Amino acid sequence: MQENNDKSIEDLVDDAKGFLEARVEYTRLYLVEKVSKIFADLVTSTAVIVCFILAFLFGSVTLALYLSDVLGSYAGGFGCVSLFYILLAVIVYLTKDKYIEKAIINVAIRKYFDKLADKEEDDEKL
């Protein structure tokens, strides 16, 4: 009887070790998945932001050159574009607390919960 109990305890300990190893492996794979998703999101977001910045810069130079041609003066064309951006900066500064920051916070929260919902759907499929 004692020998049978010893085998049962050994089996239980072996099962616990197997469970613990499986749990550690699952946690490791889960973390790898999360880090890779964050990295992929970071890389794609950075690429999109860089493309928008380049398009913005080239568009600004194009607009300035066009206005220079229309006004007949490089200083006038680039000055008009500069004044436009100064006006835009003042408007953004005055409205940032009321509108812009709230919109950015809402977008970030929505993006987080969308990713959380996707994770839950993936878990349900398993």
Image: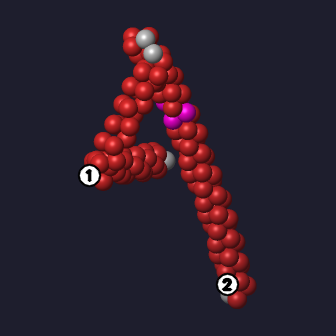
Left or right position of 68 against 14: left
Is residue 124 visible to the viewer in this orientation of the structure?
no
Q: Which mark is residue 44?
A: none
Q: Position of residue 7 (x, y in %)?
A: 71, 79
> Which of the two marks, 2 or 1, is nearer to us in this view?
1
Mark 1 crowd level (few <14, some 14–19, many ≥20, 10 Å Cα): few
Left or right position of 91 against 25: left
Q: Nearer the viewer, residue 46 or 113?
A: 46
Which residue is painted at 42% across and 31% down in the image?
82
Query: What secondary structure predominates along the stretch shown in magenta?
Result: helix
Mark 2 crowd level (few <14, some 14–19, many ≥20, 10 Å Cα): few
Is residue 50 visible to the viewer in this orientation of the structure?
yes
Whether residue 2 is situated above or below residue 45 in the rendered picture: below
Q: Position of residue 81 (x, y in %)?
A: 41, 26
The quarter of the displayed image where residue 54 is located:
top right
Q: Nearer the viewer, residue 111 or 122?
A: 111
Residue identified by numbered label 1: 98
Whether residue 97 is situated above or below residue 70 in the rendered picture: below
Most extreme residue toward the left is: 98
Magenta range: 48-52
Most extreme residue toward the right is: 3
Say which element carries label 2.
helix
Which residue is painted at 26% across and 52% down in the image?
98
Q: Position of residue 19 (x, y in %)?
A: 63, 66
Most extreme residue toward the bottom is: 2
Which amino acid type corresponds to the residue marked 1 in the rendered image? Lys
Q: In terms of sequence position, does the residue under pointer 2 or pointer 1 come before the other? A: 2
Look at the image and name its color scheme: secondary structure
Residue identified by numbered label 2: 5
